[in-house]
């Protein structure tokens, strides 16, 4: 029996945006079909249409030759289509078991749950995934990476015919990715249709059999992975050649005096963190997921309490008790979770852009609308945020464009230090290149930049210096000359 | 690694931590404090009679609290429950006076109340109104109808068996109190142990996730609105039996007491949190306190103040538990 | 039940404990009754406890249970709802504690009196107000000669039976005095409609002003507030509409009217049917002491007030009409 | 390319679309329908006097609605506002009777009300209580205190200037109505045009993100609680002036009307949405409807039912607007 999915002339329009335009292609069982495209190319939208979470404006699709049209994800699930969505979909207060099984918990005829059996099955699944948590743990006590694995388990368990992964690795680190890939391999062997969306080219080459390239909602090409080269793919999806991203970076070479110094920072998550950041420098922070990098910058930014330690900006000690203090001291942060921590999703792009600089736009507390619109428009242009209007609400942007809004916000503010926590998470290659250049430009303009990333190639190549963390402590520091992926990994795994 | 840390700790801190983790234990302590205080002030307070009396007084609010707890866990709310109780409590009295045998009359109104649940659900799930405002509006409608069907006058009844139903005692415990406990056990079981119950938590904790996982939040919330209406109608019937009359204005404001009990017991408006055990303890705290204030003859106006204060005190108490836990 | 052989003197006897169960102490009348009971308590050696049901019959039932538990010798009962009187009274009967009702009736479904009570003669109060207007309108300067264009506003609350009865008594009285009064000109300012504000003055204000505003054709207004709070709201509405000179406002109760008069305010508020809490309290206490100290049965007290066929006495009290000029001699 | 599509459309559909996008326009249509209906039934309804009278009747609820709107947009709520109005309205009467000059007395109570706002904020922001339940408790405390300070009796006043303040008219418009409009304009401006107002929307939409972007949600909500309390206290003063007496039970329940007005006007409990223009229209719909029902002599109990129904009708009307928009 052969599984396949076939899309025919699928189109989808939102207000002011043609998200998908006449897409046709076919994905067969037993192969991993990667969807590749820039942010906002329509990958997530296509998957949502597949599961009935969104309705196509026109077009149809077939599963094993049968024309289907789901009106809700439930129908799709019953039919055998599961999706691991880009946004994690978990119930934080419930146990891992309940999250994974959801409405499918083992039960008797009366609907009474057999928790023992459910937990038992869950335990098996956890072992299969080689995860350290227990079936009883509440999901919100797990780290982001483990939550993502729970999300994957959810879809895996269903044993669906068709499984789609929408950027599953965005918050995973290498060991978990290994596990994930071995599982995908197994699924492939079982003849399932697998869709895989990612912006990490390396992964695509590792896992995909065939690649569908989308651009601005249009189908560009279908290629066999074995026949493709990275440059070619990038050219097709971005529409221009981005060349050797890292070597073409125009870096800053004038590194100045110390702008930020952290001395003996300590709280519940981090221990004895010391480092300095210089003017014009890009300081990378590497480590495995859960190493405490985010916690370090949260502490610096005043979002978490410090139990001990001092923070100096331009040589002056700063009492930072809240993000507001930090911003006044000239520090800005792009948080790692753009939906939860970055954007006010229900408000417009304009309003999201101008939050930290409202006071500059206002006289006597009254916002000058003209100024605000002008500045917002400039930022949208400069960041190449794909949107018909600055008044569009942020929730309607694609993931990558949302990230650009947050970045754009800080470029408007007058900063000395900018901290970027996983700024390229879920960002397409073209934009990534733009962001790397932007980081360098920022450094050139005299900012100190802290760049946190779990993707080793980018930390290693963009940073002037890298600090490696593990379990809340700094395990080492690597100068530009010593920088290599192996060196970073060694420090990241080093036992204390 | 974290698990091992936990188990390594001495049994004692383990127990403390376990106790601290449970919101219910903390609220139980508050309850014991309340009871001890009033017993100290007047030792009649702790008598069997008074304690069962507290349960009896809790029965209407308690039944409403069951519906509220389920709905709030699911991320909804029902501000109409007290009016529903009044409407159907009045109606059952009218039916009985019109000669309908009381068990049939009771059954009829409880079944009829399904319609209110459906309307609430329809407004929320089909027309996308916010539950707070939709049920507030329906509350107004039900309350008005309650007065209309009886022309504003309470409806005395004279059906002995029915009155017995509301006033008899078993082993000294009033029948409505027993029913209250039975209902709490049944719904506690449903909420905690059945697939339906767990679904309630899922749709409350994250409706999108639940929906994507194949649950139907609209269906589940519809069932909950219906349950809430039916239990409320039943509470109304019980109230009528207890009062020997249908009261169109009966129970006014009781929905807030019910919600308060739920919150005291650890249910959160954000949804997905809490359980009926906690709600029951919350209910007892409120009722023991209210009863105690009367027992020690606190003046009426100070009682109003005191009720606000105990609520705050109990919740702050709970805050410190959470604080310590997070350290 | 703790009744000692008695003579009329109360000194040297054990202090009795009575409890006053009231619907809500936010009502000033109930505060006045409490004060009168306490005054009499000092005189006759009994202690007065109070219970506030906050307008909830369930609460009242529970409070009765609490009181019976801690032991009381007698109960005064302002029942929250007349319809539930049997449920409350049966609790006292079961505990063999004497009970006397206040303001509201204690009757069962078949109109049988189930305990003695001192009642406000609601229709009578309304009628007195009407009578006052009929007798005195000429002195008010308001012109009622074209009676077919005169409007009547019943400021009342249809949730409370006693209020309705007062309003009905008022209209019935007016119709007798002014046969030309048109039914279509009789309006109800019904505070039950104002769900948003349980405050009666504000509710009455809103209702009354809407009626006045929408009927400019009415040449003169006869307004009754069936309790003083409605009266106060109506007074403000009349003033806001600028029809003080064309309106006669009367009310039942008196606690607010006298304050207004003392402040020289409310020119349109001409008279009020005043009832004195002490009048009630005296009867209540007399009956209660007769039962507790003299050992009389409930059915034996106040035989002069028993209606034919009823087991218990019903004392109807209606008030006296007072005005701006006369209130000082009547109200302390 | 897509932008051009939009502008290519005929001016007519553009306008329709523009109108459809605005919740306020839709509610304005509901308002006009309500007014037309009642005018048709009784043409005196539309008289200048009755219209200003409606505004006057709206003044208490309207002032409370300002505080509620701001708080709900910020993701909070204040169920204590009506009790605060009663408490400080009574207190100002007591102060004036004690000989304090009325402007000073008014100032004193409005300033004193800050304390209630601070307590609310403290419970919510420091002790982490849910706003719904914290302010419900404080409402009980304030309401009890209102009765205590005046021993349960309303407090008549005799200070002519003060009374004038509540009852005088300018161009036939009652002064409280003018104040109401002025307050709506001022707070509308603050909410719509100032940095502070913008911050309110941002913290309501996503407190974490707003905080990380440099706003201080706790500070902002504290200010809002204080504003809500102060405006409520001011409403209480105005009510006392209007009634010539302090009413300890005054305004009870008005907070729900205030919240209803806000919701009708497009404010959402989820926070970050709505404005005071909408709230004002919502307020007018409610008041015009209430007044109209009395004008056409609908019986009280049917009025209660009708109020629930209009609320539902208006919100469903809005639902269809949103539906069409999303297509
Ligand atoms: N609910 C919506 N309303 C309006 N426009 C939307 C909505 N959802 C998505 N879009 C638009 O549709 C287009 C495609 O979005 P989609 O999320 O599918 O992109 P994507 O390829 O998944 O991008 P990314 O890699 O950034 O996740 C974008 O331009 C986006 O702005
Ligand atoms: N809410 C929480 N409850 C319990 N533990 C937490 C919580 N948040 C973080 N932690 C723990 O704190 C440590 C550091 O967390 P975090 O994942 O932010 O590190 P990181 O280095 O920033 O990783 P990432 O690459 O995800 O940003 C981890 O061990 C994590 O499990
Ligand atoms: Mg996507
Ligand atoms: Mg991190």
Image: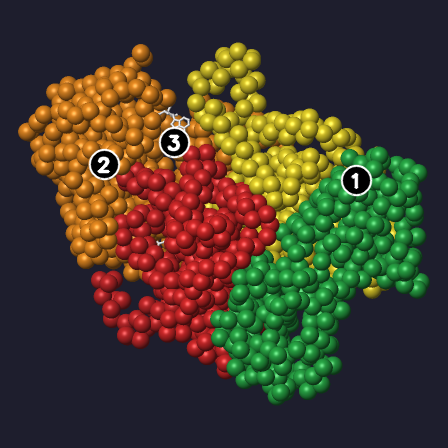
Chain colours: A orange, B yellow, C green, D red
Q: Residue at x 80, y 36 (%)?
A: C15
Q: Position of residue B289 (x, y in %)?
A: 65, 36
* Res. A350 in view: no
Q: Which of the chains bears the disc numbered 1?
A: C
Dots 3, 2 in contact, CB < 8 A:
no
Tell which residue pokes out farthest to the left in this image.
Answer: A254
Mark 1 vs mark 2: in front: 1
Q: Residues within 10 Å of mark 1 (few under 14, many from 20)?
A: some
Quarter-of-image position of residue A86: top left
Quarter-of-image position of residue A185: top left
User: Is the C-beta of the residue carrying label 2 under 8 Å from the nearest atom of ligand 4?
Assistant: no
Label 3 vs 2, first from the N-terminus: 3
Q: Residue at x 43, y 64 (%)?
A: D164
Q: Residue at x 40, y 34 (%)?
A: A148
Observer-nearest of C121 and B80: C121
Which element carries disc 2, helix, strand or loop?
helix
Residue pointed to by mark 2: A327
Q: Position of residue A260 (x, y in %)?
A: 18, 26
Residue pointed to by mark 1: C45
Dots 1, 2 in contact, CB < 8 A:
no
Residue pointed to by mark 3: A144
Which element carries disc 1, helix, strand or loop?
loop
In the rendered image of this protein, does residue B122 appear above or below residue C246? above
Q: Residues within 10 Å of mark 2 (few under 14, many from 20)?
A: many
Observer-nearest of B26 and A207: B26
Q: Which of the chains bears the disc numbered 3?
A: A
Tell which residue pokes out farthest to the front in this image.
Answer: C329
Q: Residues within 10 Å of mark 3 (few under 14, many from 20)?
A: some
Q: Are marks 1 and 2 on the same chain?
A: no
Dots 1, 3 in contact, CB < 8 A:
no
On screen, residue B165 versus residue B284, left or right, reads right
Work out how far the residue at label 3 is from the one at label 2, CA to CA, in angstroms.
26 Å
């Amino acid at each position: 029996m052969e599984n396949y999915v076939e899309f025919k002339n699928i189109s989808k329009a939102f207000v002011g945006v043609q998200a998908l335009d006449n897409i046709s292609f076919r994905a067969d069982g037993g192969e991993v079909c990667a969807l590749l495209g820039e942010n906002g190319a329509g990958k997530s939208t296509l998957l949502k249409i597949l599961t009935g979470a969104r309705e196509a404006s026109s077009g149809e699709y077939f599963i094993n030759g049968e024309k289907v049209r789901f009106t809700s994800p439930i129908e799709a699930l019953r039919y055998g289509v599961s999706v691991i969505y880009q946004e994690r979909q978990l119930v934080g207060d419930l146990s891992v078991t309940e999250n994974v099984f959801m409405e499918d918990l083992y039960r008797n005829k009366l609907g009474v749950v057999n928790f023992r059996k459910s937990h038992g099955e869950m335990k098996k699944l956890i072992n299969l995934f080689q995860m350290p948590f227990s079936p009883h743990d509440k999901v919100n006590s797990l780290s982001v990476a483990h939550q993502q694995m729970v999300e994957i388990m959810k879809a895996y368990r269903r044993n669906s015919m068709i499984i789609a992964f929408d950027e599953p690795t965005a918050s995973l680190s290498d060991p978990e990715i290994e596990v994930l890939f071995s599982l995908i391999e197994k699924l492939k062997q079982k003849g399932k249709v697998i869709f895989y969306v990612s912006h990490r080219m390396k992964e695509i080459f590792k896992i995909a059999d065939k690649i569908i390239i989308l651009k601005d909602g249009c189908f560009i090409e279908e290629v066999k992975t074995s026949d493709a080269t990275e440059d070619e793919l990038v050219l097709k999806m971005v529409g221009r050649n981005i060349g050797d991203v890292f070597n073409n970076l125009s870096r800053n070479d004038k590194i100045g005096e110390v702008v930020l110094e952290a001395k003996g920072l300590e709280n519940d998550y981090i221990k004895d963190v010391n480092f300095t950041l210089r003017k014009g420098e890009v300081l990378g922070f590497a480590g495995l997921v859960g190493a405490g990098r985010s916690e370090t910058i949260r502490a610096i930014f005043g979002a978490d309490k410090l139990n001990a330690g001092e923070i100096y900006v331009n040589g002056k000690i700063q009492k930072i008790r809240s993000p507001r203090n930090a911003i006044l001291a000239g520090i800005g942060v792009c948080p790692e979770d753009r939906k939860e921590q970055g954007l006010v999703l229900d408000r417009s792009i304009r309003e999201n852009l101008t939050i930290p600089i409202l006071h500059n736009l206002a006289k006597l507390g009254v916002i000058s609308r003209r100024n605000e619109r002008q500045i917002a428009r400039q930022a949208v242009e400069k960041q190449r945020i794909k949107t018909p209007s600055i008044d569009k609400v942020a929730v309607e942007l694609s993931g990558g464009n949302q990230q650009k809004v947050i970045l754009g916000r800080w470029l408007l503010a007058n900063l000395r230090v900018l901290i970027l926590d996983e700024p390229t998470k879920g960002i397409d290659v073209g934009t990534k290149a733009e962001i790397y250049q932007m980081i360098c430009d920022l450094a050139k303009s005299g900012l100190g930049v802290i760049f946190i990333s779990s993707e080793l190639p980018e930390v290693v190549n963009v940073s002037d210096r890298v600090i490696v963390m593990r379990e809340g402590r700094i395990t080492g520091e690597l100068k530009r000359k010593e920088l290599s992926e192996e060196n970073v990994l060694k420090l990241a795994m080093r036992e204390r | 690694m974290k698990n091992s840390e936990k188990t390594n700790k001495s049994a004692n801190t383990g127990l403390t931590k376990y106790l601290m983790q449970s919101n219910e234990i903390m609220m139980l302590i508050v309850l014991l404090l309340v009871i001890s205080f009033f017993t100290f002030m007047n030792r009649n307070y702790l008598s069997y009679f008074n304690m069962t009396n507290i349960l009896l007084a809790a029965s209407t609010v308690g039944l409403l609290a069951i519906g509220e707890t389920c709905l709030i866990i699911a991320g909804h709310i029902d501000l109409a429950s007290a009016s529903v109780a009044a409407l159907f409590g009045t109606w059952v009295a009218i039916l009985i006076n019109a000669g309908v045998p009381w068990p049939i009359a009771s059954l009829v109104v409880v079944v009829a109340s399904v319609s209110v649940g459906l309307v609430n659900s329809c407004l929320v799930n089909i027309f996308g109104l916010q539950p707070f405002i939709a049920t507030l509006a329906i509350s107004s409608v039900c309350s008005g109808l309650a007065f209309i069907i009886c022309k504003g006058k309470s409806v005395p009844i004279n059906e002995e068996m029915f009155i017995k139903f509301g006033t008899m005692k078993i082993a000294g415990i009033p029948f409505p109190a027993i029913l209250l406990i039975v209902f709490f056990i049944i719904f506690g079981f449903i909420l905690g142990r059945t697939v339906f119950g767990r679904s309630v938590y899922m749709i409350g904790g994250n409706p999108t996730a639940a929906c994507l996982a194949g649950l139907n939040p609209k269906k589940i919330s519809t069932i909950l609105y219906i349950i809430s209406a039916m239990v409320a109608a039943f509470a109304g019937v019980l109230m009528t039996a207890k009062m020997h009359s249908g009261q169109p204005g009966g129970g006014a404001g009781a929905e807030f007491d019910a919600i308060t009990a739920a919150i005291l017991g650890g249910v959160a408006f954000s949804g997905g949190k809490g359980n009926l055990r906690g709600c029951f303890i919350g209910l007892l705290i409120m009722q023991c306190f209210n009863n105690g204030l009367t027992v020690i003859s606190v003046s009426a106006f100070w009682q109003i103040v005191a009720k606000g204060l105990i609520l705050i005190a109990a919740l702050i108490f709970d805050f410190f538990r959470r604080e310590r836990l997070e350290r | 039940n703790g009744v000692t052989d008695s003579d009329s003197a109360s000194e040297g006897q054990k202090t009795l404990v009575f409890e006053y169960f009231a619907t809500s102490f936010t009502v000033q009348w109930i505060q006045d009754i409490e004060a009168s009971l306490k005054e009499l308590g000092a005189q006759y050696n009994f202690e007065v406890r109070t219970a506030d049901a906050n307008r909830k019959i369930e609460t009242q039932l529970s409070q009765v249970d609490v009181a019976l538990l801690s032991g009381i010798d007698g109960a005064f009962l302002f029942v929250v709802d007349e319809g539930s009187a049997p449920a409350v009274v049966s609790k006292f009967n079961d505990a063999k504690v004497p009970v006397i009702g206040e303001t509201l009736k204690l009757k069962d479904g078949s109109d049988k009196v189930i305990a003695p009570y001192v009642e406000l003669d609601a229709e009578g109060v309304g009628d007195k107000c009407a009578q006052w207007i009929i007798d005195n309108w000429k002195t008010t300067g308001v012109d009622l000669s074209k009676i077919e264009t005169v409007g009547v506003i019943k400021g009342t609350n249809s949730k409370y039976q006693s209020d309705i009865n007062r309003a009905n008594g008022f209209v019935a009285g007016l119709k007798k005095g002014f046969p030309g009064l048109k039914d279509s000109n009789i309006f109800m300012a019904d505070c039950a409609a104002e769900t948003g504000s349980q405050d009666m003055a504000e509710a009455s204000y809103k209702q009354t002003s809407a009626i006045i505003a929408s009927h400019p054709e009415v040449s003169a207004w006869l307004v009754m507030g069936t309790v003083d709070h409605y009266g106060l709201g109506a007074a403000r509405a009349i003033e806001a509409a600028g029809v003080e000179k064309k309106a006669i406002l009367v009310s039942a109760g008196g606690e607010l009217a006298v304050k207004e008069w003392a402040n020289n305010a409310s020119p349109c508020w001409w008279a009020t049917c005043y009832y004195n809490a002490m009048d009630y309290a005296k009867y209540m206490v007399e009956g209660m002491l007769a039962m507790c100290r003299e050992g009389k049965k409930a059915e034996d007290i106040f035989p002069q007030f028993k209606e034919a066929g009823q087991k218990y006495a019903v004392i109807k009290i209606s008030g006296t009409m007072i005005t701006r000029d006369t209130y000082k001699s009547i109200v302390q």
